[in-house]
Every structure is written in C-alpha cells, then in structure tokens.
Image (cartoon, grey):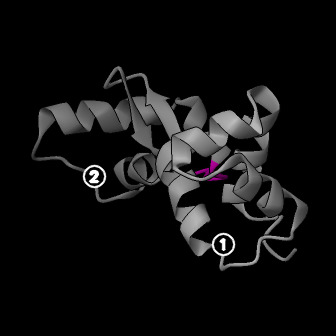
Amino acid sequence: MSYTGERWFKLMADEVMATSQQSVGNRIGKSRTAISLVLSGKYPADTRHVAAKVLAVFDRWHCPYLGADITAQDCFNIYSGPTPSHDPARLAHRRMCRTCIHKQKTGDEA
C-alpha cells in the first residue's frame, strides 16, 4: 500500500475513525466496501479517483477571517501568494493568516 502515507489516506482514515466507513462512503460517493478495500490496501482499481473525492470533501479548514470552510489548497494560496497590497480586505486576511493555526499544519514557517 504505497498510498498509506499520503495526506488523503490519513484524512480518510481519521474520518472513518471519527464516524464510520459507511458515513465516509456516503459523503464521497463510494460504497462501504470500497472504503474498506482502500483502507486494507486491496482496492482493485486506481485510487486516484478516491483520493480526489476525499480531498474535495475532507481537506477543508475553517478560516477564521472568512468565517467559512475553505480547502487546504485555498488556505495555502492565500497566505503564500504575493502580498495583496492593492486590496485592503485581502491584505487584512493575509495578516490574520500569520497567526492562524492552519498555517502551521502545512509546515510553513515563513
């Protein structure tokens, strides 16, 4: 199982532990059996589609500035992109990112 160290797999396994295989399957459009097979490393098909669904559904963080859930990629793009000095709202958002707990989850120390 070469994919067990990947972020999507950990997200899926954590969600299964918190809820159930059936719940995770329902949320990503896969059967409980498919989830079980992926977790055990016996899924007969390519896992890229499962990975994409898992990331789309579970790879979200609550943004304190926006007051809404956003994808981890969007979070990364906001705080690591060019400084938006021309837009006061985006600049305020970027400033808040400096102290956000999610920034540390990605390992960025800048």
Type of the residue with mark 1? Thr
Q: Is residue 59 visible?
A: no
Q: Residues within 10 Å of mark 1 (few under 14, many from 20)?
A: some
Cα distance between the residues tagged 1 and 2 = 36 Å
Where residue 70 sits: x, y (%)? 40, 38
Compared to 45, does 61 lie above or below?
A: above
Q: Residue at x 45, y 54 (%)?
A: 73
Label located before the other in sequence (1 or 2): 1
Q: Which quadrant of the figure has residue 97? A: top left
The stretch of residues the image draws in magenta is 106-110
Q: Nearer the viewer, residue 105 or 46?
A: 46
- Residue 93 counted in the magenta span: no
Pointer 2: residues within 10 angstroms few (<14), some, or many (20+)? few
Residue 103 position in % (x across, y down): 56, 42
Provide the secondary structure element on which disc 1 rests: loop
Q: In percent of the image, x 42 and y 22: which residue is there?
A: 64
Q: Which dot, 1 or 2, sits closer to the camera?
A: 1
Judging by the rendered image, the residue that carries numbered circle 1 is 47
Q: Which mark is residue 65?
A: none
Q: Position of residue 38 (x, y in %)?
A: 78, 62
Using residue 28 as the reference point, say whether residue 40 is left or right of it: right
Are dots 1 and 2 in contact, CB under 8 Å? no
Dominant SS in magenta: loop
Numbered tag placed on residue 83 in the rendering: 2
**Callout 2, which amino acid?**
Thr
Q: Quadrant of the N terminus?
A: bottom right
Picture coordinates of residue 69, whole percent (x, y): 41, 31
